[in-house]
Image (cartoon, rainbow, N blue to C red):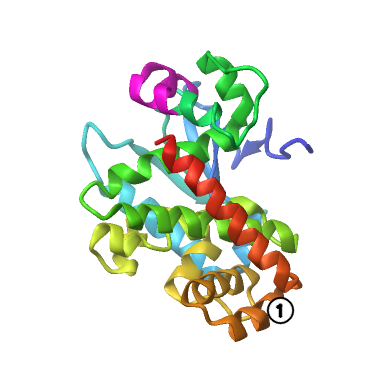
């Protein structure tokens, strides 16, 4: 994996980038040293490829301005915002030290129990039982851990909703991921995220516009769920295919599958694989 070109770099002659601590759909968050003072801060840098869309850069700036106006003990302090000559757009915030995701799982009995059930399910087909949290985390890997937490937390979000709504969200997520992987055109996590949050309006009893304002998703996911993505965008086509498959609109499914370059038989296989995965996952949560 190539090294991050920003590591070790000094931003705007004020902040030295020391380490990456988070990655999102719009920006990457780093630990940085404020050179004039010597303290440590968090610096959020907008992804370079997003600078081609001025609306996203403006949205990033509005986020900085809104956050700077918030004054509360439980809200991080915003120190600075700027744009460098080489078009690096950044937001500097208070760095709050806390437990990482692995530590939080290990310290939560309920999550630990569910994690062990999940990693010992038929999905993994291990020859020997996984008995420790450390080995379970190693099996999943960082991306797998984050995905599992989202899956495990979904029933909490839908505590007062029919179980079928959770199942449908998970099925959409895995089905979309399978299609993305089969087509070889989009990172599977993007398709999974799109499917997982596609029923957020029903889960929250809010409009999808309101629901998406409460979380930060990859721009292509947000545009797809809002119906504003270009019709030729492949993530949007995946979403349309998933919905048409649910409705049994086979003619449209065939057309959309052809646009993705996915054989019709592979679509059915992707759905069956997704259904099997959901059955195993829901048994473990």
**Rendering coords of residue 49 (x, y %):** 66, 59
Residue 280: in magenta span: no
Residue at x 64%, y 17% (from the top left corner): 128
Give percent across and percent down for residue 163. Answer: 31, 52
Q: Position of residue 78 (x, y in %)?
A: 37, 40
Quarter assignment of residue 268: bottom right
Image quadrant where residue 107 sits: top left
Q: Secondary structure at mark 1?
A: helix
Residue that sits furthest to the right in the current view: 2
Prevailing SS of the magenta stretch: helix
What's the magenta region?
A: 101-114
Please give the name of the residue rendered at 71% of the width and 65% of the height, measured from the top-left corner.
Answer: 266
Q: Residues within 10 Å of mark 1 (few under 14, many from 20)?
A: some
Give the position of the N terminus as an image quadrant: top right
Residue at 33%, 36% in the rendered image: 77
State left or right for residue 187 relative to residue 200. right
The residue beneath circle 1 is 259
233 left or right of 211? Answer: right
Residue nearer the viewer, 187 or 83: 187
> How many badges with numbers are in the image?
1
Q: Quadrant of the C terminus?
A: top left
Indicate the position of residue 133 as horizontal and vertical percent values.
Answer: 51, 17
**In the figure, is residue 238 to the left or right of 207?**
right
Front-most of residues 2 and 172? 172
């Amino acid at each position: 994996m190539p090294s991050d070109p920003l590591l070790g770099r000094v931003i705007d002659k004020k902040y030295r980038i020391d380490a990456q601590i988070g990655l999102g759909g719009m920006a990457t968050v780093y630990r940085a040293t404020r050179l004039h003072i010597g303290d440590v801060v968090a610096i959020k840098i907008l992804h370079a490829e997003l600078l081609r869309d001025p609306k996203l850069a403006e949205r990033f700036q509005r986020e900085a301005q809104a956050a700077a106006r918030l004054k509360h003990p439980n809200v991080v302090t915003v120190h600075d915002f700027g744009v460098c000559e080489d078009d690096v757009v950044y937001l500097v915030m208070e760095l709050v030290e806390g437990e990482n995701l692995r530590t939080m799982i290990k310290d939560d009995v309920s999550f630990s129990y569910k994690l062990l059930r999940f990693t010992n399910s038929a999905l993994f087909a291990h020859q020997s039982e996984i008995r420790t949290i450390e080995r379970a985390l190693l099996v999943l890997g960082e991306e797998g851990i984050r995905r599992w937490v989202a899956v495990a937390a979904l029933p909490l979000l839908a505590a007062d909703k029919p179980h079928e709504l959770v199942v449908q969200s998970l099925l959409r997520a895995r089905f979309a991921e399978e299609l993305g992987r089969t087509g070889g055109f989009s990172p599977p996590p993007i398709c999974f995220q799109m499917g997982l949050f596609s029923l957020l309006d029903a889960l929250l009893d809010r409009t999808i516009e309101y629901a998406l304002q409460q979380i930060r998703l990859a721009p292509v996911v947000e545009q797809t769920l809002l119906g504003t993505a270009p019709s030729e965008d492949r993530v949007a086509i995946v979403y349309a295919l998933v919905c048409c498959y649910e409705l049994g609109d086979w003619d449209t499914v065939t057309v959309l599958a052809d646009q993705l370059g996915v054989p019709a038989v592979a679509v059915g296989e992707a759905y069956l694989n997704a259904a099997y995965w959901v059955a195993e996952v829901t048994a473990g949560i």
